[in-house]
């Protein structure tokens, strides 16, 4: 990668809870180039959303970051002043959250919510002045049109409850797009929706990102959706990145036992049953297993896996964190 | 529509011209509008469709949660169309259901033991203490015995669904409705639950009505598949044929939108059908064929006349003008 837009180095995120500390993220490394589309996949509770929230510094109060750096455009977000972070949130990174119903305020009209986003993301940094009202409204209508919503003028006057799930998700995407300058983080966009709507939304995302040269991080546990959109995929398990590869390489030949199991367990359109590939479930973060966090569920456990943590190392055309490939 | 109504000995459940309409302030919602199908003994009959297509309502009417507006339901020869209050109790225990979200289908204030023993007591299956039978049921779904005194909130999503399955199987049913049993779970949990359900089906000779919007999953569980759109069935076919030779434009659109993970699947998907629009409100159903505003092959006749179900090949039914033009189109129900 020649120019990297985002670089996460050795990120740890802990949560203080009753009964101890949840050590959730455990040394996450992540890189993203300009105009690159990357996927982040893994089971529920593996830390995908936590990683993304730490980029924007919107973790809950119980969280702390004992170690790690998040460089965005060369600057460490974690060390920025709150004013600088605000600027990143307004003009640099925008995020589409998992649940469109929860992300929209139910008591304000769509128009008010979207014009607010446009107003704050376009404040002139030198003079501190807003755009003219008509200009803001015109942009709002335009972006609603961009996401293929019918009759945007009417939708501006609707409350979120008057829209269907697919339409709400598109409003959220419109709000994220209008402020996205460099990076768009899409957390499970459309996985709660029907396949035809999901298909439309993913196509729209890819198309808009291409047109504007925005980088995209797509978070999902739906592996098929990721495969259709991104260039590279990060596979995450229990707070660790376990495999990073080009989309084609990962899906045709996964190396990490967890990635292999995950792909095997996806039902195929061609039939043939569903193999049970991974036993057990994600470990408790209060007492995560020593060594490789996947070893209690792994079929290839070796003595070293219980003692040492495998590092994410080069394995030919990709990086894998597994002792099977590190001799 | 007479092609599938009427009972035969190999069918465990027959649904004929079923309707379920709801009155709302905006008008009548035709959630289920003339649906007919039958489920054979020991098979898994799949029902797919987008949200709002009426697949869950169909299941709830069969369960007796709603009384049908019109139409017939026959189960093991008995007429079930009267609604749940008039159903004889011995018949009720033969039909069970597993709901989509185990978080809300299990009572949070009851222990696993209380949840699983309720159907045992209601149907007088065990006299007195049910502990032995509950143990047996938990053992069957591979949950440790000490889960008996836990509350649902102390269990993971997959484990909660196992409890729901144990509860459904407690009364020794012959027919189980599975309403999106794994859509809230991760793929690894899903694989475990699906394989367990398929094992029980063989072991206890169960018939399943399997509802899901996940077509890839459907391919791997169902023996026959029906697809619903706006309260009507568009196409019914044996599973292999349904996925290899889809006929209805809606089936093709849905299949071409499925995200897949291998190149072999990519080849199977119908090409060049770009999905557009979304399912309209069931209050204002478009005239003619309900799918015509989204249909890539819509014609003049589709806007005026409702197509009738026709058998194109043996066991492969489709409701679309594309396949009936030129033939008699007048035998609409």
Image: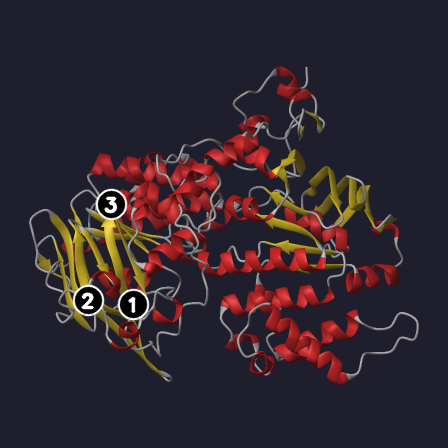
Disc with the residue nearer the chain's start (2 vs 3): 3
Q: Quadrant of the N terminus of chain A?
A: top right
Q: Looking at the image, which is closer to me, A288 or A118? A: A118
| Residue A161 can be seen in this image | yes
Q: Name the outermost residue toward the right.
A: A126
Disc with the residue nearer the chain's start (2 vs 1): 1
What residue is pinned by disc 3?
B128
User: Is B295 on the left or on the right of B72, as rendered?
Assistant: right
Query: How far apart, in angstroms, are the residues tagged by discs 3 and 1?
Result: 45 Å
User: Is B117 on the left or on the right of B175, as rendered?
Assistant: right
Closer mark to the observer between disc 2 and disc 1: 2
State the mark number for residue B308.
Answer: 2
Rendered location of residue A113, percent (x, y): 67, 75
Dot 1: element: loop
What residue is pinned by disc 1?
B231
User: Is A83 on the left or on the right of B90, as rendered?
Assistant: right
Q: Chain of mark 2?
A: B
State the mark number for residue A183.
Answer: none
Q: Looking at the image, which is closer to me, A245 or A220? A: A245
- Residue at x 72% of width, y 50% of height: A35
Rendered location of residue B56, percent (x, y): 32, 61
């Amino acid at each position: 990668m020649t120019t990297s837009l985002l670089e996460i180095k050795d990120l740890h995120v802990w949560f203080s809870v009753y009964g101890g500390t949840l050590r959730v993220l455990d040394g996450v490394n992540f890189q993203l180039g300009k105009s690159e589309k990357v996927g982040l996949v893994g089971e529920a509770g593996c830390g995908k959303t936590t990683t993304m929230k730490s980029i924007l510094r919107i973790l809950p109060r119980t969280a702390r970051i004992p170690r790690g750096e998040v460089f965005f455009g060369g600057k460490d977000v974690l060390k920025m002043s709150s004013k600088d972070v605000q600027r990143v949130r307004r003009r640099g990174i925008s995020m589409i959250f998992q649940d469109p119903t929860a992300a929209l305020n139910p008591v304000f009209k769509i128009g008010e919510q979207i014009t607010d986003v446009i107003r704050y993301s376009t404040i002139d940094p030198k003079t501190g002045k807003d755009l003219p009202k008509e200009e803001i409204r015109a942009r709002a209508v335009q972006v609603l049109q961009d996401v293929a919503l019918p009759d945007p003028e009417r939708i501006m006057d609707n409350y979120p409850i008057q829209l269907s799930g697919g339409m709400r998700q598109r409003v959220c995407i419109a709000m994220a797009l209008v402020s996205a300058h460099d990076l768009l983080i899409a957390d499970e966009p459309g996985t709660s929706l029907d396949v035809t709507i999901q298909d439309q939304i993913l196509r729209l995302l890819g198309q808009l990102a291409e047109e504007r040269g925005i980088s995209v991080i797509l978070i999902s546990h739906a592996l098929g959706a990721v495969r259709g959109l991104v260039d590279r995929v990060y596979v995450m398990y229990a707070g660790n990145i376990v495999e990073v590869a080009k989309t084609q390489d990962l899906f045709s030949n996964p190396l990490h036992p967890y990635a292999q199991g995950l792909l095997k367990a996806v039902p195929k359109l061609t039939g043939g049953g569903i193999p049970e590939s991974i036993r057990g479930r994600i470990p408790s973060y209060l007492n995560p297993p020593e060594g490789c966090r996947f070893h209690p569920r792994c079929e290839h456990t070796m003595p070293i896996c219980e003692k040492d943590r495998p590092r994410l190392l080069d394995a030919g055309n990709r990086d894998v964190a597994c002792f099977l490939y590190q001799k | 529509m007479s092609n599938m109504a009427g009972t035969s000995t190999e069918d465990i459940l027959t649904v004929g011209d079923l309707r379920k309409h709801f009155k709302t302030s905006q008008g009548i919602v035709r959630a289920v509008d003339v649906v007919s199908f039958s489920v054979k003994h020991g098979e898994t009959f799949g029902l797919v469709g987008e949200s709002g297509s009426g697949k869950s309502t169909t299941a709830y009417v069969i369960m007796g949660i709603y009384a049908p507006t019109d139409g017939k339901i026959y189960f093991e020869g008995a007429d079930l169309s009267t609604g749940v209050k008039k159903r004889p109790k011995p018949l009720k225990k033969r039909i069970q259901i597993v709901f989509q979200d185990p978080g809300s289908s299990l009572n949070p204030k009851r222990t696993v033991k209380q949840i699983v023993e309720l159907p045992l007591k209601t149907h007088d299956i065990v006299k007195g203490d049910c502990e032995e039978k509950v143990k047996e049921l938990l053992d069957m779904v591979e949950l440790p015995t000490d889960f008996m005194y836990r509350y649902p909130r102390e269990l993971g999503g997959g484990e909660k669904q196992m409890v729901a399955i144990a509860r459904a199987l407690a009364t020794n049913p012959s027919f189980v409705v599975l309403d999106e049993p794994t859509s809230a779970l991760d793929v690894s949990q899903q694989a475990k639950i699906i394989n367990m359900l398929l094992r029980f089906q063989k072991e206890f000779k169960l018939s399943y009505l399997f509802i899901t919007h996940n077509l890839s999953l459907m391919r791997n569980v169902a023996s026959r598949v029906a697809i619903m759109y706006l309260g009507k069935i568009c196409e019914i076919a044996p599973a292999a044929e349904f996925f290899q030779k889809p006929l209805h434009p809606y089936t093709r659109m849905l299949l071409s939108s499925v995200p897949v993970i291998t190149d072999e699947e990519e080849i199977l998907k119908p090409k060049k059908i770009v999905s557009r629009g979304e399912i309209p409100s069931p209050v204002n159903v478009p005239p003619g064929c309900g799918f015509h505003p989204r249909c890539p092959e819509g014609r003049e006749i589709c806007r005026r006349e409702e197509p009738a179900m026709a058998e194109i090949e043996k066991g492969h039914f489709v409701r679309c003008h594309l396949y009936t033009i030129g033939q008699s189109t007048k035998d609409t129900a």
